[in-house]
Amino acid sequence: MVVLKTDREIAKMKDAGRIASMALKLAGDAVEPGISTLEIDGIVRKYIESEGALPSFLNYGGFPASACISVNNVVIHGIPSETCIIKNGDIVSVDVGAFFEGFHGDNAATFACGDISQEARALIDATRESLYEGINAALAGGRIGDIASAVQRYVEARSYSVVRDFVGHGVGAKLHEDPSVPNYGMAGRGVRLLPGMTIAIEPMVNMGTHEVKVLDDEWTTVTADGKLSAHFEHTIAITSDGPIILTQCDGAID
Ligand code: MG
């Protein structure tokens, strides 16, 4: 069931989104050679709690940390670890949510550590841009498939692939609400987009095959071919005046 939000609720979601966005920015600022993903997770958690909010992911379905931190060929759900040390040339995807006054904000971005390859840079840029293609297609009166096909078209035109096993989602009082928001599909199909819908659009884009596998820890999701993957996400509200990005803060990269 899709839960529509009032203008007042959307304003509250903006507060949660601002905290999630600043947490993501701080994580990105911390990416440098020699830092562990557990240290980045600590920065994220400390900031979120300092705002009087809760990290949405901590203990969600048993996830043991505040942020998912996924390096290079890890697509999503990387578990922060003191033994995962970031090196020059790595790409680091951070996904973080904040729960504040009854609502969640959820966002993600992929950051470069030092000097990354041109190929890695191009993948990051295309993934970020595909998110905005999806957001721009999130128009009241349209369909979920409009978002899905906008992302897929942009990504596949650049010979990358979109992950299919994991998708975006509605977000609000619960971290994951209806509807599912896939990054592939046909325009004009699927759930009708209505003013008051709040959704997380989150393309996961692979350099090679779209296929992924989940490791034995039951979280860490890697590309099946070991090639790089990038991930960007915003929480947005659909309104009669167009989409509004809720996960924004001063000084954010996007
Ligand atoms: Mg999400």
Image: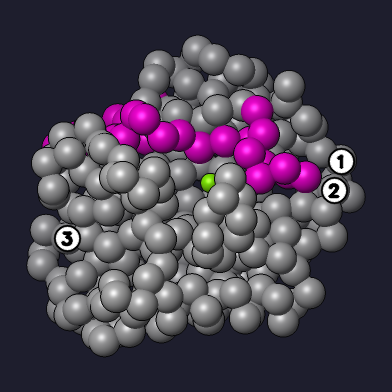
Front in this rendered view, residue 48 or 15: 48
Region of the chain picked out in magenta, as a range: 149-178
The residue identified by callout 3 is: 120
Q: Position of residue 73 (x, y in %)?
A: 21, 53
Ligand 1 within 8 A of label 1's CB?
A: no
Q: Would you identify the image quadrant in which residue 28 lies? A: bottom left
Secondary element under disc 1, as helix, strand or loop, is: loop
Q: Would you identify the image quadrant in which residue 248 lies? A: bottom right
Secondary element under disc 3, as helix, strand or loop, is: helix
The residue that appears at 40% across and 60% down in the rendered structure is 79
Q: Residue furthest front?
A: 216
Tag count: 3
Above or below, 167 against 8 in this view is above
Q: Earlier in the sequence, mark 3 or mark 2?
A: 2
Query: Does the image show residue 165?
Result: yes
Q: What's the CA distance linking mark 3 and mark 1?
A: 40 Å
Query: Does the image show residue 160?
Result: no
Above or below, 66 against 49 in this view is above
Q: Position of residue 160 (x, y in %)?
A: 19, 39
The residue that appears at 44% across and 18% down in the rendered structure is 187
The kind of residue tagged 2 is Glu
Number of other residues with Cα within 10 Å of mark 1, as a class: few under 14, some 14 to 19, many 20 or more: few
Colour scheme in use: one colour
Number of other residues with Cα within 10 Å of mark 3, as a class: few under 14, some 14 to 19, many 20 or more: many
Front in this rendered view, residue 134 or 17: 17
The residue identified by callout 2 is: 9
Q: What's the CA distance linking mark 1 and mark 2?
A: 5 Å
Q: Are marks 1 and 2 in contact (CB under 8 Å)?
A: yes
Q: Earlier in the sequence, mark 3 or mark 1?
A: 1
The residue identified by callout 1 is: 6
